[in-house]
Amino acid sequence: MLFNSYPFLGLVILTMVAYYLPPLRDWQRHTLIVASFVFYAANQPWLLLLLVCSIAVNVVTSHFVYHGSPPRRTTYAALGVGLNLAVLAFFKYSPLFGKSFFSGTGSVGEFLVSIPLPIGISFFTFQGITLLVDTLRVQEERAEFALPHGFFGRHAVNTTLFIAFFPQLVAGPIVKAHDFVPQIVPKFFRDIDWDACFRALVTGYFLKMVVADNLKDHTFWIARQSFKIAPGTDLLVMLFGYSIQIFADFAGYSLIAIGCASLFGYRLPQNFNFPYISRSFSEFWRRWHISLSSFLREYLYFPLGGNRRGGVRTYVNLMVVMLLGGFWHGAAWSYMVWGGCHGVALAVERFCGRYVTLPDLPLVNALRMLGVFVFVTAAWLLFKLPDFSQAVDFARAVEANMGLPPDLQRCFFIAAYSVPVILWHLHHLWGKPVLARVPGLAAVAYGFMLFLIVTNSGAPGAFVYFQF
């Protein structure tokens, strides 16, 4: 069920009506759980069983982690994390392993290749892991934070809501248990922050429906073999457009999720913070997919030792995190290569930063932003073309076809639909006070976005991160 569809709008409205009815206030959690199951089962009904089984595993193991004796808590937590990772590996990576290590015509290979990819599995398994780790830390590190585990039935309901909460179920933001579970309290209609909801939803739908959905109609040629005969300028412009598209698509989804969650009284973490004005790769990863970066840092990088075990170990930890973070994105080796490219960039940047300090000058900062953006955009090619050989062919085509005349109409449309994202970033870069200083300008801006959503939306398409 797409966020930009009438069934989703109907689901949200009906859920809100039942959710805020005073006689049903004691059933708010159950109302959201039912809505979440309906949302998840809309496209793949039978895979709802997988979600329920994943939730059950996390409910039971986290319960024993909380109530078990000290020597066994770590064992139960490790068991739960292992089961989460095993489910993720089986359903997400079996087709890749089948193609890579087994004959395509053999029974084992055919079975592995035929395994479907459940939507959102990368996200809800990671949230299960946060529940287990945070529960373990309750006794060891987070005495001030209490997960409500006292009664098994209440714990089961809370855990189900935490993992299945439909606004962020299939594409994040990834929510940590210690951030979400304490929010599970009775909610009231009068407490809704309508202004924040409106701004998040309008901006999110504008980024998705006007920017991303229109750009996809011009960038999809990258994934076709016809790119081999396209002008080199067109290929570069299309890759630039895809960089803008993937940001608008995923940032749009995140804002819609945040806005929808706010309608039900829940705060989801910010997932994007204008990443394309980053002056370094480390800054980029503090601004892009913030919830994933935070998860990898807190639940992988720090447990590996972070930067506390010497220089060599720091670089090893950094590469391990980025390689696994890249591989998390998709069942293709190119995603690991993508993560490795960012890992190398972060390592080189960290090493050079020990000896060179760049001056804080406008021209230097602009060149740094441009360099980071060009690198990030070039790396997105591995997202658009997960087949590594096709990515190589694309790069060769850019060089070979640079002398061909460009398609000016295509370049114009890509540039036109990229302008809002560029202006949005520049507005933030230059102090973002314009909308606040000019009376009524913010209302005009949001009104204009609403107008374009109604009049100039592209053909509806699935969100890019649904495939992950």
Image: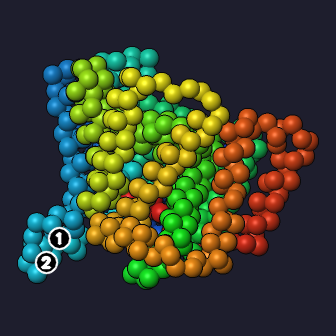
Toward the viewer: 110 or 400?
400
In the rendered image, which quarter is residue 394 located in? bottom left
Q: Position of residue 207 (x, y in %)?
A: 64, 59
Are there few (<14), some (14-19), or many (20+) residues within 10 Å of tag 2? some
Q: Name the residue at 59% across, 36% down.
A: 365
Q: Name the residue at 44% across, 31% down.
A: 178
Contact? badges 1 and 2 (CB < 8 Å): yes
Report the coloring of the rendering: rainbow
Toward the viewer: 434 or 59?
434
Residue 448 appears left or right of 234: right
Q: Position of residue 32 (x, y in %)?
A: 53, 51
- Position above or below: 430 against 413: above
Identify residue type, mark 2: Gly
Q: CA distance from mark 1 to mark 2?
A: 6 Å
- Position above or below: 366 against 336: above
Toward the viewer: 361 or 189?
361
The dot on residue 69 is none
Q: Name the residue at 38% across, 22% down.
A: 354
| Secondary structure of residue under mark 1 | helix
Label 1 belongs to which residue?
99
Label 2 belongs to which residue?
104
Is residue 235 shown to the viewer in this render?
Answer: yes
Is residue 238 shown to the viewer in this render?
Answer: no
Residue 295 appears left or right of 357: left
In the displayed image of the protein, which residue is found farthest to the right?
Answer: 439
Q: Position of residue 353 (x, y in %)?
A: 41, 27
| Secondary structure of residue under mark 2 | loop
Identify residue type, mark 1: Lys
Q: How many marks?
A: 2
